[in-house]
Amino acid sequence: MTENKNVDHVNAPSEEKPHKRRVRYSGKYPKKFSEKYKEQNPEKYGDQIQHVISKGNTPAGMHISIMVQEILDALQIQPGMKGLDCTLGYGGHSTALCKKLEGEGHLYSLDIDPIEIVKTTKRMRDRGFDENIWTPIHTNFRNIGEVAREHGPFDFIMADLGVSSMQIDNPERGFTWREDGPLDLRFNPESGVSAAERLKELDRDEMTSLFIENADEPYARDIADAISKTLRAHKPLETSGQLKQLIEDVVLQEKEVKSLSREEQKKLVKKSCTRVFQAIRIDVNQEFEVLYEFLEQLPDALAPGGRVAILTFHSGEDRLVKKFFKMQKKMGLYSEITEDVIRPSKEECYRNPRAHSTKLRYAIKA
């Protein structure tokens, strides 16, 4: 599934689209993604963006990079180095890495998302990072071996394994249960099967295992049973809203939940929705398989003395990174690894609540 193509040049549409009236900005803080056009236009509405961030929220269509300074401290970038950002996303980390190069050396950035990489390429070019300093590559970071053979080895590598806020917030991508949209959950909607199709391929026991292994969901069996019955009855389960409603119905029928206050019930429903969507997303995108392949090839992609920093966002990812770093250090591939995980500061977690679960580990090539 290699998709190794540069996207430096974005072709403009040849035909002009008819003018469409913009959705009215409903109140100070509109709830629907489509109505938050001010938040999605930082150049024009900078004050609005800063106000949203100051409240501890992420503006719609944006992504606030996490632990930037800690990553820079771990990588110790010097001008003239060659680096790789395995997860481009909104471009925040790549911007910080490019700035450390001070116009000398080169950074390559990977992204599997064909929608966001085009937007971020324009964003990076607008920030002044031309072809001499920065190159985007449309491919999955599981293909780091191929990338390294063509462009490496690298003096520094970083990977942010989190889902970008742009993907989570946009209901059209199907990542969020908060708004109704197609039940998709693919990082690359042009490849593989959607979440809706994937659920049809699984039986109840497979779904139960999926929800437990990928998200530690306490009501895994009951939710899996409800999904299986819905699909067997040929009832629709094609949107994020339909899956969210099914999860809510299951959780509220649990004996221990019925006696709780309405507020406590809402919290439990929210947690189960978050866990189940996470579990399905991990499966649809083969996230553990991708990470395993990446970690296996990683030492060969680094130059001697090269450094790697990885951000993880749930325990399964962190365990795998920790396991590989320890094993590969014993094999003599790394001279140093983080003994204790590095966490974001309280101040950062306050400014950006999505940083709470983040863990950083780094290693140095022998």
Image (spheres, helix red, strand yellow):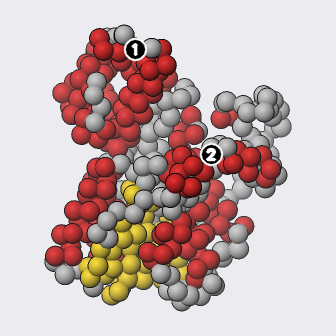
Q: Nearer the viewer, residue 194 or 25?
A: 25
| Mark count | 2
Query: Which of 248 and 236 lies nearest the eye of the viewer?
Result: 248
Q: Quadrant of the N terminus?
A: bottom left
Which circle's residue, 1 or 2, is located before the other in the chain? 2
Q: Position of residue 162 (x, y in %)?
A: 45, 52
Q: Mark 1 = which residue?
A: 260
Q: Amino acid at mark 2?
A: Gly
**Label 2 Cα neighbours within 10 Å, binned few <14 / some 14-19 / many ≥20:** some
The residue mark sitting in front, 1 or 2, is 1
Percent x, y for residue 74? 44, 75
Which residue is rendered at x = 83% and y = 32% of the image? 21
Visible residue check, residue 21 = yes
11 versus 179 height, above or below: below
Q: Nearer the viewer, residue 194 or 222?
A: 222
Q: Residues within 10 Å of mark 1 (few under 14, many from 20)?
A: few
Task: Name the disc covering residue 277, or none.
Answer: none
Query: What residue is shown at x 27% (from left), y 28% (from top)?
Result: 218
What separation in Å lies between label 1 and label 2 (alpha carbons)?
29 Å
Q: With respect to residue 315, does 310 lie above or below?
A: below
Residue 365 position within the rendered picture, expressed as x and y whole percent measured from the top left: 31, 81
SS type, badge 2? loop
Residue 191 sits above or below residue 293 on the image: above
Q: Residue at x 26, y 19 (%)?
A: 222
Badge 1 marks a residue whose secondary structure is loop
Say which quarter of the image contains residue 309.
bottom left
Q: Quadrant of residue 161?
A: bottom left
- Give residue 56's mark: 2
- The quarter of the rendered structure image containing the C terminus is bottom left
Q: Amino acid at mark 1?
A: Leu
Residue 312 lies, in percent from the top left, at: 38, 56
